[in-house]
Image (spheres, rainbow, N blue to C red):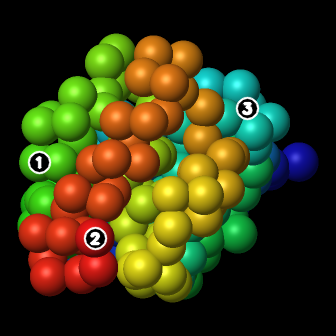
Amino acid sequence: MDRTVEIGLRVNGERAMRRIEARMNLVDFLREELGLTGSHVGCEHGVCGACTVRVDGRIVRGCLMLAAQADGADVWTIEGLSDTGEIRDLQDAFVERNALQCGYCTPGMLLTLAELRERNPAASRQEIREFIAGNYCRCTGYEAIVDAFEMARVREGGPS
């Protein structure tokens, strides 16, 4: 019995078509099939946020979504958002505020904060903390991450 499927999707603006194992999750597809290793595999239970990617405009946990479910979707990874410059201000603020240390959580954290900026650009410190609660960081203690979001917001002319 053939347990493979053919999928076609757009990843970072480029068309990708592959025949893959039906049970392959999205983050493994991105890493193994396309060489996009910015999204990490952490807990494999959707809890840590290291595998966060954007699918059709919303962040998802790439370890919980099958690649076959993304057939026809528009997927963006940390590499694509970095290349477009969409998150450059957040990246710069992360460096300046020392909001990254080992860097393992950083791609997922940046995608999550980019979505928060879309949904609630004036988020309070508490709202920022709540929004990133599904992204584990074992190094920074989160304060610098919240500071970085606020710094990027102020630089864009948003509320301080």
Whether residue 56 is visible, yes or no, is: yes
- Find disc 2 in the rendering and name its residue: 160
Q: Residues within 10 Å of mark 3 (few under 14, many from 20)?
A: some
Question: Residue 133: x and y, percent?
Answer: 67, 47
Looking at the image, is 127 positioned above or below residue 2?
below
Q: Is residue 32 left or right of residue 132?
A: left
Kind of residue at badge 2: Ser
- Of callouts 3 and 1, which one flags the residue occurring earlier in the amino acid sequence? 3
Kind of residue at badge 3: Glu
Q: How far separated are the C-alphas under marks 2 and 1?
A: 17 Å
Q: How far separated are the C-alphas under marks 3 and 1?
A: 29 Å
- Find disc 3 in the rendering and name its residue: 44
- Find disc 1 in the rendering and name its residue: 92
Q: Quadrant of residue 82?
A: bottom left
Residue sitting nearer the eye, 134 or 157: 157
Kind of residue at badge 1: Asp
Question: Residue 23: x and y, percent?
Answer: 77, 46
- Label 2: element kind: loop
Question: Residue 35: x and y, percent?
Answer: 31, 39
Looking at the image, is 101 positioned above or below residue 59?
above
Q: How far separated are the C-alphas under marks 3 and 2?
A: 36 Å
